[in-house]
Image (cartoon, grey):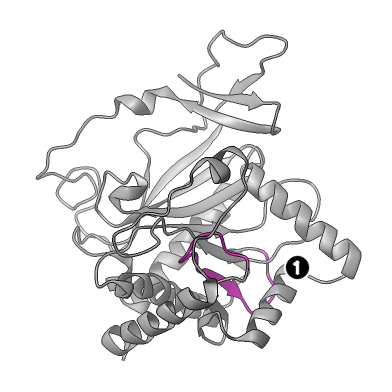
Amino acid sequence: MAELRWNPFIKDWVMIASHRQNRPHLPKDWCPFCPGSGKVPDKFDVFQYDNDFPALSINPPLPDDVGTSFFKTAPAYGKCEVVLYTSEHSKSLSQLSVPHVEKLVDLWIERFTALSKDEKLKYIFIFENRGEVVGVTMPHPHGQIYGYSYLPKKIELECEAMKDYQDHSQRCLQCDSLEEELIVKDRIIYQNKSFVLYLPFYIEYPYGIQIVSKRHFSNITEMNHAEKADLAEIILIATGSLDELFDKPFPYMMCFHNAPINLGKEIPWHFHIEFFPPMRSGDKQKFNASSETGAWAHCNPTAPEEKAKELQIACKKYIDKILR
């Protein structure tokens, strides 16, 4: 079964992908993403790989005959891709070089451009899940790209917030938020000429860092050469800082927020990347319990200013060890 089902209470689609439940368990000594597997080239730096068990597809099956005049279904149209960061199985993103991650940035841009040509797609979501605690079953360093035929609810809410702010102030919400953070400085972790890494004032996750572009642009295809290099560097520093916090690989969800596509109207948007690390310390998970899950009423059990200090120290350690 692979289809979309409409939730009328929150006005959002839910992907039903029961076929993914039967994904096979892979042998411990074999990885489909490694050279020699027969699934990928024998040599590569970065590589795009179509997901073998996609929740969305460009030729989706018809929905099961379970809908009614009240319960709406739709074909699960879209695209699910895997992006391999390196051919080396045991490396992580933070262990790559800046030039290598620049190749990854170029691949993300290439795939965003290609997928944007499909007018049925409305949002392209580049992301990485890292660590068993967020459900990762394939340790080979990789991320994913989903192309949705609809706007996911969080993106829809961000669009509404940015448009309301622009209508009221004739300014960009993200630009003004970043400007305030740069004035306060306490939560800034690192910045280069093009991007700022910081822990937002309002963040719900203890280590929920974000990367925001200094120049106002809406998606990664609009970056110039210098911005691509700076994005590669600051992604390395963001992931490396998390790993340095407790001297071990730190789980996270890294989520690129590009502007929606193919809506037939311009949406005010400012490119940024959000991280959701599901830990509140080296050995304690930050669970989304009833308040967060049932009411979307978020609670951060830590002070962002204190966690920012930890991240600033970790950032300096990473830069001193890896990049200098």
In the image, what residue occupies the spot 38% across and 84% down? 313
- The residue nearer to you, when weighing 175 against 246, is 246
In the image, what residue occupies the spot 46% across and 54% down? 127
Answer few, some or many: residues within 10 Å of disc 1's Cα (few below 14, many 20 plus, some between 14 and 19): many
**Residue 56 position within the rendered picture, expressed as x and y whole percent measured from the top left:** 49, 33
* Pointer 1 residue: 173
- Is 206 one of the magenta-colored residues? yes
> Which quarter shows the C terminus?
bottom left
Identify the secondary structure beneath mark 1: helix
In the shown orientation, is residue 76 left or right of residue 154?
Answer: left
In the shown orientation, is residue 128 left or right of residue 37?
Answer: right
Stretch in magenta: 202-218
- Is 212 one of the magenta-colored residues? yes
> Which quarter shows the N terminus?
top left
**Residue 154 position within the rendered picture, expressed as x and y whole percent measured from the top left:** 64, 48
In the shown orientation, is residue 145 left or right of residue 248?
Answer: right
**Residue 76 position within the rendered picture, expressed as x and y whole percent measured from the top left:** 55, 28
In the image, what residue occupies the spot 71% across and 49% down? 157
- The residue nearer to you, when weighing 18 against 209, is 209
Identified by mark 1, the residue type is Leu
